[in-house]
């Protein structure tokens, strides 16, 4: 057995291990720093997923407006305004942030704005004459603030992790956003939707509104580790005026150099389109299920928790797959499978399951693995159980698609222009993100059918997926 002894006095010590290098060439963040970065998404998860998709969207449409068709149309117009503002502000503020250096101050300011706007949504009560415009305005401000803060947060990704691990970290971030949403949803449901619990003295209508201040409190608590432990970019030394001038010149140069960044531009265009298809669907998923199948809060809770739980595991798996086969292949697989299962789900009605003879129901055939569980939970009809299953399968591919989109951009952009390009990334995520909800709103208004309104999204998925084939997974050097 070899004995380990101290080196002799005066002998040279062993060289220190080289620190791991991030995609920008800086040392990677510590484990606590990486943990803080992904906990940021845990903190924002209830707002982006639970509150907007499953609680506030149906509350706005079915309670405040009181009509699912008009409510869906108004919600589409609200999302349109928010999307336009995000599209305009994200690249400008991203370029400014690159010029200034640190990301945390901007994240802090916009998080405070988001928290304040969520507090205002508590006052969006049906009996108030201005409840609808108040809800629309407060949601728009909260959504814009959260998205801009997300630009700064995403731009830190290339600076804190190595290229070998970037897919796993991005996937873990999205997984924790789903986990935060599930945890917040479960707590909200136990406290405010369980009949045996007194719901802290609030009435039935307020039990949905209370998710707004609850999401604000959740955000305030769980974002703290990010500010404490995650390393930030160094200050550039520029004054605000100098940074504005430098940022605008840099953004202008980048936009004028699109021929040099052709590969990045192609990816951003593809992502603009398929991302819009995915997000537009999920903007309306709750009210669609409520309107078509008549699901109440309890069934919606089971549906939401199942979707979010699947998203947690699939995001982790998708991040690992991304590091193994690459971002482009992961995206092509997930976008195609998302569209396939969405098409199957939208073909189901309360009266029929198109690809299955309804006689199967009487012969004991059901949704594999989970059919009996769903029936025990109150999903008594075969079509709604198949719709539930298709919704779960559709959601399975969302987390990996979102995580790999962020990873793909990190892999192909110049690292020292990360905030600027993630600002443009957010712009391209919103340029048609307002067109998707607008298309659904207009199609729903014109046709008077929720299913027809949702069906227009397949164009976005097809075109965006086709453009991905033209993208090369290789880094573009900074333009001279």
Image (cartoon, helix red, strand yellow):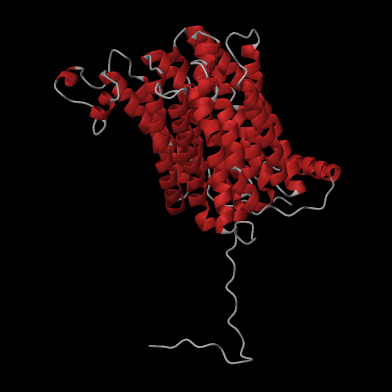
Q: Position of residue 466 (x, y in %)?
A: 47, 35
Instruction: Name the residue rendered at 56%, 39% in the picture.
Output: 43
Q: Is residue 145 above or below residue 222?
A: above
Q: Is residue 137 above or below residue 405?
A: above
Corner quadrant of residue 86: top right
Whether residue 382 is situated above or below residue 244 in the rendered picture: above
Q: Is residue 468 above or below residue 208?
A: below
Instruction: Write down the quadrant of residue 190 in the picture.
Output: top left
Q: Is residue 398 visible to us here?
A: yes
Image point 83% across, 49% down: which residue?
A: 238
- State the image coordinates of residue 33 (x, y, percent, origin top left): 59, 54
Give 343 or 44, whichever is nearer the viewer.
Answer: 44
Identify the residue at image location x=39%, y=14%. Answer: 292
Of all residues shown, which one is farthest toward the left? Answer: 363
Quarter of the N terminus within the rendering: bottom left
Q: Position of residue 440 (x, y in %)?
A: 51, 17
Q: Is residue 333 toward the left or the right of residue 248 in the image?
A: left
């Amino acid at each position: 057995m070899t004995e380990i002894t101290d080196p002799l006095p005066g002998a040279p010590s062993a060289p220190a291990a080289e620190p791991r290098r991030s995609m920008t060439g800086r040392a990677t963040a510590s484990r606590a720093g990486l943990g803080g970065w992904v906990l940021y998404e845990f903190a924002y998860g209830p707002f982006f997923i639970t509150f907007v998709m499953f609680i506030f969207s149906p509350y706005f449409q079915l309670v405040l407006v009181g009509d699912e068709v008009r409510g869906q149309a108004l919600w589409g117009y609200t999302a349109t305004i928010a999307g336009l503002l995000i599209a305009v502000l994200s690249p400008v503020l991203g370029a400014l942030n690159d010029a200034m250096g640190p990301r945390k101050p901007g994240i802090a300011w916009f998080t405070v704005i988001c928290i304040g706007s969520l507090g205002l949504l508590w006052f969006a009560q049906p009996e108030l004459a201005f409840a609808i415009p108040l809800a629309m305005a407060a949601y728009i401000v909260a959504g814009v603030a959260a998205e801009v803060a997300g630009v700064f947060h995403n731009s830190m990704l290339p600076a804190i992790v190595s290229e070998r691990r970037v897919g796993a970290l991005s996937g873990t971030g999205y997984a924790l956003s789903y986990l935060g949403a599930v945890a917040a949803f479960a707590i909200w449901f136990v406290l405010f939707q369980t009949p045996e619990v007194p719901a802290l003295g609030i009435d039935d209508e307020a039990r949905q509104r209370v998710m707004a201040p609850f999401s604000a409190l959740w955000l305030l608590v769980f974002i703290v580790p990010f500010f404490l432990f995650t390393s930030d970019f160094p200050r550039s030394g520029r004054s605000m005026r100098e940074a504005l001038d430098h940022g605008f010149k840099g953004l202008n140069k980048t936009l004028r150099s699109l021929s040099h960044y052709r590969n990045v531009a192609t990816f951003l265009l593809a992502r603009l389109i398929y991302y819009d298809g995915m997000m537009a669907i999920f903007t309306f998923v709750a009210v669609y299920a409520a309107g078509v199948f008549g699901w109440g809060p309890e069934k919606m809770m089971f549906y939401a928790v199942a979707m979010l739980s699947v998203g947690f595991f699939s995001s982790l798996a998708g991040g690992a797959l991304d590091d193994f086969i690459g971002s482009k292949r992961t995206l092509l697989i997930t976008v195609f499978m998302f569209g396939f299962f969405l098409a199957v789900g939208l073909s189901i009605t309360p009266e029929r399951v198109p690809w299955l003879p309804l006689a199967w129901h009487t012969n004991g055939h059901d949704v594999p693995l989970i059919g009996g569980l769903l029936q025990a939970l109150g999903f008594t009809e075969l079509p709604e159980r198949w719709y539930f299953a298709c919704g779960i399968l559709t959601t399975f591919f969302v987390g990996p698609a979102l995580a790999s989109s962020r990873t793909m951009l990190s892999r192909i952009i110049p690292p020292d222009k990360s905030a600027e390009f993630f600002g443009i990334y957010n712009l391209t995520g919103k340029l048609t993100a307002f067109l998707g909800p607008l298309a659904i709103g207009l199609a729903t208004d014109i046709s008077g059918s929720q299913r027809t309104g949702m069906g227009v999204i397949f164009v976005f998925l097809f075109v965006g997926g086709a453009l991905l084939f033209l993208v090369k997974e290789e880094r573009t050097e900074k333009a001279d």
